[in-house]
Amino acid sequence: MKIKGVLGLLFSLFLKLFGIAVLFGLIGYCFDLPVFGMFLIGFVVNFFLGTIFTYFYGYMHEKLLVDQTKKMLEYQSNKTATVACAFCHEPNIVPIDLSQTKFRCTKCHHVNRLIAEFSAAQITVPQSTDDMIGRAVE
Ligand SMILES: [Zn+2]
């Protein structure tokens, strides 16, 4: 079982390293061209294409990761709140949903009751505008 996996991995590695080179060598053999020269050309082409592919794949993967992290942070900041567990005081991220009044702690797995508190505040005008005393906006 393990040897089969290792052999599969080695075969995959061989194909990735020499697949295109062997193909170029076969083309050279079929068309009566120098086989070793075609093999070398194939190896160089494979090397450069592999390098370029790896570079762009890494770049795209990193960009995707950054975008996902940004979206996740945006979602968490708008639609979730951090609440400490009543039993172990571990901070838990809970969705802001008025129909959901309980959450389970990620650390101690106790069910906590969620209490939301609302209050009102005046809307004030920023001080950089004409109204410098900050009166409430109608
Ligand atoms: Zn807890």
Image (cartoon, grey):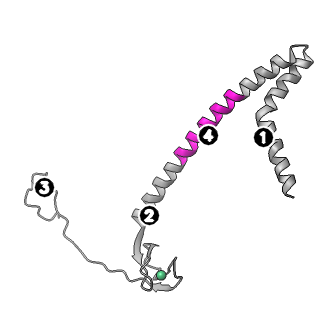
User: Which residue is rendered at x = 83% and y = 23% of the image?
Assistant: 24
- On the image, the x and y values in percent for residue 125 come to 16, 59
- On the image, the x and y values in percent for residue 23 come to 84, 27
Kindly identify which residue carries mark 1.
Answer: 13
The nearer-to-camera label among 2 and 3 is: 2
Q: Marks 4/2: CA distance?
A: 28 Å
Q: Are marks 1 and 4 in contact (CB under 8 Å)?
A: no
Q: Secondary structure at mark 3?
A: loop
Q: Marks 4/3: CA distance?
A: 49 Å
Given residues 117 and 42, the one toward you in this image is: 42
Question: Quick check: is 109 in the magenta stretch?
Answer: no
Q: Earlier in the sequence, mark 1 or mark 3?
A: 1
Q: Secondary structure at mark 2?
A: helix
Q: Which mark is residue 57?
A: 4
Q: Which mark is residue 76?
A: 2
Q: Secondary structure at mark 1?
A: helix
Q: Which mark is residue 74?
A: none
The nearer-to-camera label among 4 and 3 is: 4
Q: Amino acid at mark 4?
A: Tyr
Q: What is the crowding at mark 4: few (fewer than 14 residues within 10 Å), some, or many (at least 20)?
A: few
| Image: magenta residue range | 47-64
Q: Earlier in the sequence, mark 2 or mark 1?
A: 1
User: Which residue is rendered at x = 13% and y = 52% of the image?
Assistant: 129
Q: Amino acid at mark 3?
A: Gln
Given residues 12 and 123, the one toward you in this image is: 12
Position of the C terminus by quadrant:
bottom left
